[in-house]
Image (spheres, helix red, strand yellow):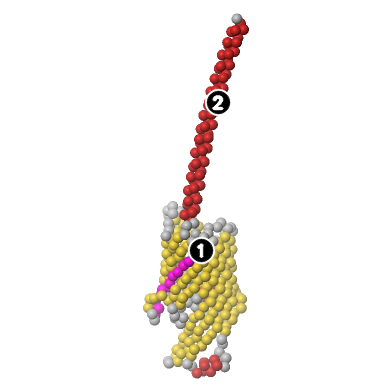
């Protein structure tokens, strides 16, 4: 009898233990299912966020157009500041409307015209420009760009005409340092004319010029995000640069002055002017940019101090104000 009671109690104890184990197992399954569900939800959220970021990135990398309007006193708005010291500032306001197509690969093509108030022809286009180029897409280490610009000049003898028709330019900037070092290379060529008249006598000179420049520079970008709203940004970049260049100018006279014809026939008039590689000028460039949405406003001032011997004033200044709208 005692053995039977002991067996019954043992069986009851085993049932309790079994029920407890089953309960614990079910609870574990519930927790595991909850954890698995949470992990699955987190994975889904992460995947959705990743897809959203990728979609945004793809949008950022999409091709787009830019409509631009520049105002300033530069006869040509070349990027190569090494050639600027050879060109005097315009005394009239110059308008430069331009349309640019930016491909997501970094390639671009711009076309525009240069408008100004010519005292002989009135307010009209003095030249047109076409410029293919490339800018390295957003990179944390370097800025890289190169471009070719051709200027179609209406009148090579106009005081407002560009002396440059072909301009090749390349630049690289290292961004990781506080003071960003950069170097740019530029090669420019072109033709311009000068006319001197005394009564019914004249002397027209056609000048063919070529210039190659190397411009090391140092700059720092100050940037402020969300200045007035969540979609704006302000940046300011001062740059110091030194232009090292050489150049050649070939002269051709067309005149009815007998003395000049006499000297020209006997090769007594200078036909070439060559300058070897030398420190040509020092420059200070102040470039600001304010972006809000698709609109960008860029004021820029450039001061150039000519180092070589000259009878002209050594310090010249240029200013421009650009408006850009992307669509």
Residue 258, position in %: x, y?
Answer: 50, 95
Q: Which residue is mark 1?
A: 107
Please state the horizontal and vertical placement of residue 264, each as a whole percent of the image: 54, 91
Question: Residue placed at 58% from the left, 10% from the top?
Answer: 8
User: Is residue 55 placed above or below 263 in the rendered structure?
Assistant: above
- Which residue matches tag 2? 25
Q: Nearer the viewer, residue 149 or 226?
A: 149
Q: Which x, y percent locates residue 233?
A: 46, 57
The quarter of the displayed image where residue 246 is located: bottom right
Q: Which sits in the foreground, 163 or 45? A: 45
Q: Position of residue 192 (x, y in %)?
A: 49, 81
Quadrant for the C terminus in the image: bottom left
Which portion, as a residue range, is magenta? 109-119
Identify the residue at horizontal 53%, vertical 58% (top origin). Answer: 138
Label 2 or label 1, whichever comes before in sequence order? 2
Viewer-proximal residue, 55 or 239?
Answer: 55
Q: For the point 51% across and 43% down, which residue is it? A: 46
Is residue 256 placed above or below 184 in the rendered structure?
Answer: below
Q: Secondary structure at mark 1?
A: strand
Residue 175 picture quarter: bottom right
Name the magenta segment's main secondary structure: strand
Q: Does 117 lie within the magenta span?
A: yes
Q: CA distance from mark 2 to mark 1?
A: 64 Å
């Amino acid at each position: 009898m005692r053995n039977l009671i002991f067996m019954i109690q043992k069986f009851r104890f085993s049932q309790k233990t079994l029920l407890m184990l089953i309960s614990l197992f079910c609870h574990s399954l519930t927790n595991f299912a909850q954890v698995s569900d949470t992990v699955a939800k987190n994975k889904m959220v992460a995947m959705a966020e990743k897809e959203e970021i990728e979609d945004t990135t793809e949008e950022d990398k999409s091709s787009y157009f830019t409509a631009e309007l520049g105002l300033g006193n530069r006869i040509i708005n070349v990027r190569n500041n090494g050639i600027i010291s050879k060109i005097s500032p315009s005394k009239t306001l110059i308008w430069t409307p331009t349309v640019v197509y930016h491909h997501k690969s970094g390639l671009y093509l711009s076309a525009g015209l240069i408008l100004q108030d010519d005292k002989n022809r009135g307010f009209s286009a003095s030249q047109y420009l076409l410029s293919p180029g490339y800018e390295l897409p957003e990179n944390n280490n370097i800025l890289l760009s190169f471009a070719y610009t051709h200027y179609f000049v209406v009148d090579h003898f106009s005081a407002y005409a560009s002396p440059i028709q072909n301009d090749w330019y390349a630049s690289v900037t290292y961004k990781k340092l506080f003071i960003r070092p950069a170097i740019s290379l530029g090669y420019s060529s072109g033709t311009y004319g000068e006319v001197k008249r005394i009564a019914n006598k004249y002397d027209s000179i056609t000048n063919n010029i070529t210039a190659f420049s190397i411009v090391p520079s140092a700059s720092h970008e100050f940037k402020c995000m969300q200045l007035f709203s969540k979609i704006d940004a302000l940046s300011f970049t001062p740059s110091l640069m030194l232009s090292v260049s050489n150049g050649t100018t070939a002269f051709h006279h067309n005149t009815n002055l007998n003395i000049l014809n006499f000297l020209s026939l006997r090769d007594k008039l200078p036909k070439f002017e060559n300058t070897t590689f030398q420190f040509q000028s020092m420059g200070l460039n102040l470039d600001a940019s304010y972006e809000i949405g698709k609109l960008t406003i860029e004021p820029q001032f450039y001061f150039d101090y000519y180092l070589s011997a000259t009878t002209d004033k050594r310090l010249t200044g240029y200013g421009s104000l650009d408006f850009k709208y992307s669509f």
